[in-house]
Image: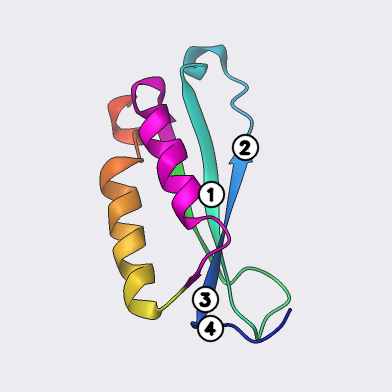
Amino acid sequence: MGALKEKYWLNFVGEAVLNSKYFDYIAGRVEIQDDESDYSIDEYRYFVHKDKWDKFYDFREEWDWKDVSEEKLKWLKEYLEANFNDFNSIV
């Protein structure tokens, strides 16, 4: 990969939800990449109820494969946690 404009880039990866109790959810991770590693250096999880799917898909479309600064990465993690992490609603 060529040099990044910013320090990191993002890759949204969907994961299968196999438990039928949670078929109303989508799950996955946002992999955090940099130019210095062959693998992701971190990941942020998401678990989203179907009521928020449209909002999540718009968010993913805006940020997937984007270069981001460290400051923007911190914001993104907080935003993802606050808006697209419905784990607590199922426990």
Numbered range of the magenta stretch: 47-67
Q: Residues within 10 Å of mark 3 (few under 14, many from 20)?
A: many
Q: Earlier in the sequence, mark 2 or mark 3?
A: 3
Q: Vertical placement of 66 versus 44: above or below? A: below
The answer to whether residue 58 is above or below residue 19 is: below
User: In the depicted view, which residue is nearer to us: 75 or 39?
Assistant: 75
Task: First in sequence, mark 1 or 4: give its number.
Answer: 4
Task: Identify which residue is drawn at 57% across, 18% down.
Answer: 19
Quadrant in the rendering for residue 17:
top right
Q: Residue flagged by tag 3: what amino acid is it?
A: Tyr
The label on residue 5 is 4
Could you tell me which residue is drawn at 35 percent across and 40 percent down? Answer: 85
| Badge 2: residue crowd in 10 Å (few <14, some 14–19, many ≥20) | few
- Label ID, residue 15: 2
Which amino acid, by three-letter code, is at mark 4?
A: Lys
Mark closer to the observer (4, 2): 4
1 or 2: tag closer to the N-terminus:
2
Do the numbered discs 3 and 4 sit on residues whose CB atoms are within 8 Å? no
Q: Is residue 19 above or below residue 5?
A: above
Q: Mark 1 sits on what residue?
A: 29
Circle nearer the viewer, 3 or 1: 3
Which numbered mark, 1 or 4, is in the foreground of this view?
4
**Quarter of image, res 69:** bottom left
Query: Residue furthest toward the top?
Result: 20
